Amino acid sequence: MLSPLRLTPFEEYMLVDDQPAYPMSCFFLPKLRGRFNVSVFKSALQKALVNHPFLTSSVTETSGQFHWQNTGKMPDVIRLPLDGERRFPASKGINLFREPALKVSVCNENTDPTEVELDGQTNIVFEVHHSASDAAGTARLIEDILCEYARLTGFADVQRESVEPDLLVHRGIFGQKRENILRVLRERFWGLFRAWKFLMRRIVPLTPQKPDRNAPMPATGYPAILLRDLTTAETQSVQQKAKQFGVTINDLFLCSAFFAMKSCWEQHVADKKRGYFRIAVPINLRTPADDRMPAANIVSMVFLDRTPAQIQDTQSLYQGVYCETQHVKRHNLGWTFIRGLSIYQRVFGSFRKMIQQDRCWATATVTNLGRLFADILLPKREGRVQIDESLELIGVETSPPVRPWTALGISVMTYADCLTINLHYDSAVLTRSDAQSILDSIANDCST
């Protein structure tokens, strides 16, 4: 990595939108079972982070421009008690101007700092500032750590291609290919059309309660994240239902999220003014050329809008969402948001004016990370990754940030052939009961 590197428009947007009351933090939680060696883990973490320099970097600002500055400092590994009810420890976020982009916690029943060998279940919590990496990049870091842990214990000497930090210089280019001028014009037309809809439509928040953007810290209990692990049978039911309706699993979850949001909104909002529910959907822009890219943001966003009246008939909603997501893929419309940020930056110079607009840009975020650690070069037992003779990865959780007015961050992933749903909710405007009802509604709607 050539330090300092200027932040890309997407990275800068994530940085400027970071607020004390609404941190721009993503959370990743691998759950391990067996004998876990803290000392070996720290060594594996240190080795892996050498190749993921953004996660040990902070940000400097000079004349209104933001740059990554690699500190080379390894994060402290904090020891915390394992809490089955609250799996993610309380956080106040990450201030990139004062500290690196990664925090790490090890949660086990045994919190004695002199104990190196921990038995039972161990949860490792990775909190990452979204400017530094998306979920796929963080997953690559964790995969590197697990492989290095296995190597250090002598369990498995895997020879995976290492990432190349110097590739970070090219992270904002994405290696786009163009076929012909007609394709370019068609993509630009649809991109402009979606951009117009993004800016002009009135978006409906889940509740009328106004978020306190100026609070000095996050709401009590941040991050408030709920979990639903689907069984093998339920996961197969999701697959069968998607096949029955002729849609993808991702489409299925998007539709279920629309139904759940509409139900919650009807319970909380008395004045049913016209507007749209909007789901922000992260789009992974990685290509095979990015296989050796370190943890970074190789991602964009697309936005799906539906009025309450359009969230009525199941068949029409499913087919409408499927057609729209296929249209997005066919015309490469994942680029629209990235291009829009670049244009906005050139015109206004900063994203602060956009962030200061007190309006709802999206009702929720829904991201599907697909099959996690499916290709890791470590042995598996019943689909679960074996890290040592007595240590296995039994599950994974992850969650995107929540934003002012965007009270839900829903994350779906598959591990060991079973689906997991995480729901990160804004506890300042939604109760735990509300959030649990939304999560149950999504899970039950998809699997029945």
Image: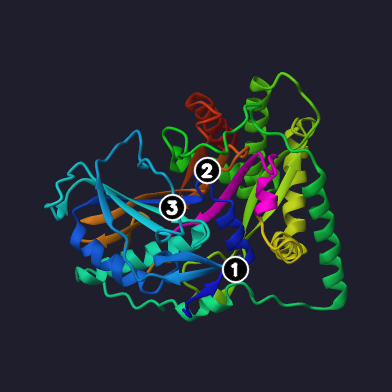
| Magenta residue span | 352-372
Residue reaching furthest to the left: 114
Q: Is residue 227 visible?
A: no
Callout 2: few (<14), some (14-19), or many (20+) C-alpha neighbours within 10 Å?
many
Mark drawn on residue 22:
2
Decide which of 63, 323 is in the foreground and name it: 63
Percent across and percent down for residue 93 are: 44, 48
Q: Is residue 13 left or right of residue 420?
A: right
Q: Is residue 203 visible?
A: yes
CB under 8 Å between callouts 2 and 1? no
Among the two numbered marks 3 and 1 on one chain, the one whose residue lies closer to the N terminus: 1
Magenta highlight on residue 180: no
Q: Secondary structure at mark 2?
A: loop
Percent across and percent down for residue 432 are: 48, 27
Residue 184 occupies which quadrant of the picture?
bottom right
Percent across and percent down for residue 267 are: 64, 20
Where is mark 1, residue-wise?
Answer: 63
Going 79% across and 78% down the picture, which residue do you hit?
179
Magenta highlight on residue 368: yes
Callout 1: few (<14), some (14-19), or many (20+) C-alpha neighbours within 10 Å?
few
Going 64% across and 43% down the picture, which residue do you hit?
254
Where is mark 3, residue-wise?
Answer: 94
Q: Amino acid at mark 2?
A: Tyr
Mark drawn on residue 204:
none
Q: Secondary structure at mark 1?
A: loop
Among the two numbered marks 2 and 3 on one chain, the one whose residue lies closer to the N terminus: 2
